[in-house]
Amino acid sequence: MEQSPVIKFFRGEQIPLELHKVRVVQKLNLVPIEERLKAIQDGGYNTFLLSTRHIYLDMLTDSGTNAMSDRQVASMLVADDAYAGSQSFDRMRDAVEQVFGTKFTAPVHQGRAAEHIIFQAFVKAGDVVPMNYHFTTTKAHIELPGGTIEEIFTDEALKIRSSFPFKGNIDIAKLRGLIKKHGAAKIPFVRMEASTNLIGGQPFSMANLREVRKVCDEHKLILLLDASLIGENAYFIKQREPEFRTTSIKDILRGMCDLCDLIYFSSRKVSSTRGGAITTNRQDLFDKVRDLVILFEGFLTYGGMSVREIEAMAVGLIETQDETVISQSPSFIKYLVEKLDARGIPVILPGGALGCHVDARGFLPHVPQAEYPAGALAAAFFLASGVRGMERGTVSSVRDANGNDVLADLELLRLAVPRRVFTLSQIEYVADRMTWLYENRSLIGGLKFAQEPKVLRFFLGKLVPTSPWPEKLLAKFRKDFGDSL
Ligand SMILES: *Cc1c(COP(=O)(O)O)cnc(C)c1O
């Protein structure tokens, strides 16, 4: 039995307290707003095209940006450089077995490499993959061999303001309906994503996973788990699912994994290193991916990873079982979203894993979806604060066969809160600048594409404002803040 660490404040405030200290630091650049305007213009109003030279807080992503522990850094010095049979890999495989309970493990160079291999091995043209929600790289890699995805989330999943604790659940009736419609033979597996990334880092419950397992058993379907954000999902199960209030994170993680047949993850999210892995207890499933790992990634004891990263991943995985590690990002996110919500700013509730998600349609009701409100909000927030977030809306979507935008379900500005990277005063600064921007939201206008790549356009696409609103926003900033950065 393990209790959550509880720290109460004398005056009753709810403040997330850091249970780590900073030992290595990196200097940040908070440049004047005039330089920020020049930077975002040069970057085509796309935050992916900014340089950290102009960024104060980088909240683009949690991918590979979490802080490492001293033990992780130390482990990198004892890495065993061998092409085959490296003991570093043995340590990683043992750590995976300890955390996930799985015997067979293959390393890969990152999460999408695991997806590439699994979907090449299991998905045929015409296949359908039911899932709680897609992730960008997942969808692309399922469509590559000719498969399609079916998202069978519950009605609560896409509601911005909700008190539903498990928006990442699969709707079981919809799952049964899909199996009936397509037949089990067309379904290579059911995919569950932990802390469902694109709908706001929202977890599924253990009860839901058990039900999904039951349906899979009835139809002899494989249950595939994307475990990239599994630690946080386990933490939310402990926080929000009464049955698990006194269960350790370690046991919850094992409980989740024991229900799944095949598991993969991006260790960029799990343990702050590069790399990833595919892992299972089923020899037959492992045999299907093994040769492809060697073909595309490298020999089975490194799989495109450096041995240093393999060592750090092993230590990082073990640390995922520590609630003081895994709770840090969700507790800062909760603090930030509750503060913004109290000020009337539309954010996804309840707070999830990964980051704070601002609802751009609620923020900018006057900007039509065809003018990319989430992209405009990301650019405007960078201008107002030097903080870089990521557009997760229609810019991150695609065009249909007729060249029309496929409008996204949600228009979000995601402000990632990587683990143990920011201080609480930096989070307060984010809340302050967001509040100013919300007061001045009527000044913000839309964007349109100037240069648009054919695939994954959000990475390299360039946009321009549909009116000179950025200059107006800058003038108002100077009026309100004087000579402040
Ligand atoms: C990041 C992520 C991936 C892809 O991992 P990469 O290491 O970026 O290739 C896949 N699934 C989920 C849920 C993710 O968050």
Image (cartoon, rainbow, N blue to C red):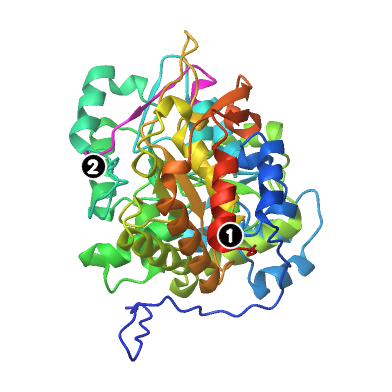
Residue extending farthest to the top is 402
Mark identifier at residue 181: none
Quadrant where the C terminus lies?
A: bottom right
Residue extending farthest to the left is 173
Front of the two marks 1 and 2: 1
Amino acid type at circle 1 is: Ser
Q: Give the x, y percent position of residue 393.
A: 45, 35
Label 1: state its secondary structure: loop
Q: Give the x, y percent position of residue 369.
A: 40, 28
Residue extending farthest to the front is 479
How many neighbours does mark 1 have within 10 angstroms: few (below 14), some (14-19), or many (20 or more)? many
Ligand 1 quarter of the rendering: top right
Using the rendered image of the protein, determine whether residue 119 is visible from the camera's viewpoint.
no
Q: Which residues are magenta?
A: 141-156
Q: Residue at left 72%, top 74%?
A: 24
89 on left or right of 151: right
Amino acid type at circle 2 is: Lys
Look at mark 2 in the image and give the residue it sits on: 214
Report the label total: 2
Look at mark 1 in the image and give the residue it sits on: 271
Examine the structure image and report whether residue 154 is included in the region drawn in magenta.
yes
Is 480 located above or below residue 144 in the figure? below
